[in-house]
Image (cartoon, rainbow, N blue to C red):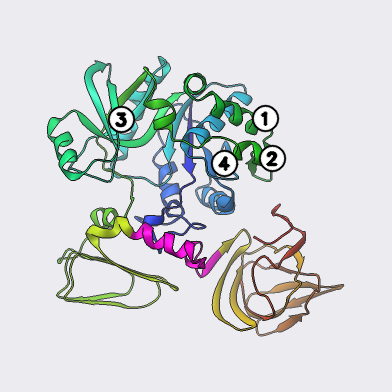
């Protein structure tokens, strides 16, 4: 059996301002109406002997991941929550250990959740070839046939020794400069490192024990202390935090003598920057990618993405312009790798634009900031049918709720009342309260907060059907 292990822990900072730390690129519909995570799972359909996927994700993304799987009508093998990022080698070790806890030793097909593969048939053929190699004990990686000299990818040098449908790995090399990358492509001996792998669970753990015994020891402790929480599997937080951080490439693949590579020519792209999205999206007659409300005149070869407002581009070329409700990015298309530096500046200034959008997803729905000032804040709140916020209270703020669509059931102290459209209520500071949607359509309401402190961490949860922490998140 083949167990897909989908790694969904990245932050995608180079695709800011669409991708944010708490809403990263793999959870966004960047190339179709499906998110990259959903596309990763959909392209597995039809592969023989495939189990339901095991997803490893950041704890902060858990409800969005679960909702996107439900949107595909997928019941996963599990959703493992990482309390902190430790790169891919520990994540895959946890997946292998979890499989063994279920009494199995499957082939693990390790897939990042944020890649684009345009030729699904070629991808599935490569996976089938990898199965043969992995069953014989090899640690298989997939090397993408390069279409050009690319400085944004690592490379794999193949020795040319053929093992069935695979090549022997001679070495892995870091992202090169342009001259070196061109030499790699011209030689015909190098493939792009895709970051996708296949191996038997026990074989991976054996190699990890050989080269990174401390990592494996920490992962075993974290896996042994793993507990169930609703639809999720929670790792032992302190044990996993003590685990050394490293990638599969550094920890195992560069050291093992059992590595082989399957060449892959399937329209692969890791969507690592805005220039990559420009290359894979459809263009107008002037070479522009236009998404949303966009007008152009004498503009060419631009990526123009409008979410909320009109973008008008006149007489410009080779630009990336991305507009969201709270930020606008303008960059030269050949400089978009440097967007990460802007995110680092935002974090250094403790600005929220690095972490989340103005619209923030919650397991019960979402809220969006409308206005904020000294001692007040206004939000648009949407509660899904049948969903419920936690029973909670606040130490520093009072709230006014106005229903604009649907029906709200409100608990306020000892009182429970139903509110219809155009009705409102007041939640005094310190009062225990809850908001629910008992109806069949989304509940939409306007919330006006007033008080001395309006942060999201001023929430004391008394009951919560989603198993969230007592303090706000």
Q: Earlier in the sequence, mark 1 or mark 3?
A: 3
Mark 4 and mark 1 in contact? Answer it, CB < 8 Å: no
In the rendered view, does 103 fall on the left or right side of 198? right
Q: Where's residue 43, x and y in %?
A: 39, 41
Q: Earlier in the sequence, mark 3 or mark 4?
A: 4
Dot 3 corresponds to which residue?
172
Q: Where's residue 92, x and y in %?
A: 50, 32
Magenta residue span = 339-360
C-alpha distance separating marks 4 and 1: 23 Å
Dot 2 corresponds to which residue?
228
Quadrant housing the C terminus: bottom right
Dot 4 corresponds to which residue?
75
Q: Is residue 65 part of the magenta span, yes or no?
A: no
C-alpha distance separating marks 3 and 4: 36 Å
**Foreground tag (4 vs 1):** 1
Dot 1 corresponds to which residue?
224
Label 3 environment density (alpha carbons within 10 Å; few <14, some 14–19, many ≥20): many
- The answer to which of 214 and 359 lies nearer the viewer is 214
**Foreground tag (3 vs 4):** 3
C-alpha distance separating marks 4 and 2: 15 Å
**Foreground tag (4 vs 2):** 2
- The answer to which of 149 and 227 lies nearer the viewer is 149
C-alpha distance separating marks 1 and 2: 12 Å
């Amino acid at each position: 059996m083949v167990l897909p292990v989908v790694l969904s822990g990245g932050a995608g900072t180079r695709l800011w301002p669409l991708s944010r730390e708490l809403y990263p690129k793999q959870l966004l519909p960047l190339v179709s109406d499906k998110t990259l995570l959903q596309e990763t799972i959909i392209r597995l359909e039809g592969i023989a002997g495939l189990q339901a996927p095991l997803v490893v994700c950041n704890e902060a993304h858990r409800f969005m991941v679960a909702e996107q799987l439900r949107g595909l009508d997928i019941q996963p093998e599990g959703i493992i929550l990482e309390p902190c990022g430790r790169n891919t080698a520990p994540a895959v070790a946890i997946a292998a250990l979890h499989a063994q806890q279920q009494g199995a030793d499957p082939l693990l097909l390790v897939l990042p959740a944020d890649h684009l593969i345009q030729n699904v048939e070629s991808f599935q053929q490569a996976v089938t070839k990898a199965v043969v190699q992995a069953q014989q004990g090899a640690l298989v990686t997939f090397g993408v046939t390069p279409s050009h000299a690319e400085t944004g990818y690592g490379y794999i040098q193949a020795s040319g020794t053929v093992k069935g449908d695979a090549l022997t790995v001679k070495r892995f090399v870091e992202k090169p400069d342009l001259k070196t990358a061109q030499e790699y492509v011209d030689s015909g001996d190098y493939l792009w490192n895709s970051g996708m792998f296949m191996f038997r669970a026990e074989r991976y753990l054996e190699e990890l024990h050989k080269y990174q015994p401390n990592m494996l020891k920490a992962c075993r402790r974290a896996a042994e202390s793993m507990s169930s929480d609703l639809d999720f599997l929670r790792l032992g937080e302190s044990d996993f935090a003590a685990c050394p951080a490293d990638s599969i490439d550094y920890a195992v693949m560069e050291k093992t003598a059992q590595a082989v590579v399957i060449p892959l020519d399937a329209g692969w792209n890791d969507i690592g920057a805005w220039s990559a999205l420009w290359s894979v999206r459809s263009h107008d007659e002037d070479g522009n990618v236009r998404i949303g409300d966009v007008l152009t005149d004498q503009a060419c070869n631009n990526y123009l993405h409008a979410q909320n407002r009109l973008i008008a581009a006149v007489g410009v070329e080779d630009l990336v312009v991305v507009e969201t409700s709270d930020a606008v990015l303008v960059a030269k298309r050949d400089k978009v790798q440097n967007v990460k530096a802007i995110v680092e500046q935002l974090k250094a200034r403790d600005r929220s634009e690095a972490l989340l959008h103005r619209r923030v997803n919650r397991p019960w729905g979402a809220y969006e900031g409308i206005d904020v000032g000294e001692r007040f804040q206004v939000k648009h709140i949407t509660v899904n049918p049948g969903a419920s916020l936690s029973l909670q209270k606040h130490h520093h703020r009072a709230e006014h709720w106005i229903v604009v669509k649907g029906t709200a059931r409100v608990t306020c102290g000892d009182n429970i009342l139903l509110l219809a459209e155009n009705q409102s209520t007041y939640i005094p500071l310190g009062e225990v309260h809850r908001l629910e949607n008992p109806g069949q359509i989304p509940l939409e309401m306007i919330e006006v907060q007033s008080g001395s402190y309006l942060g999201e961490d001023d929430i004391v949860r008394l009951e919560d059907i989603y198993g969230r922490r007592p303090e706000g998140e």
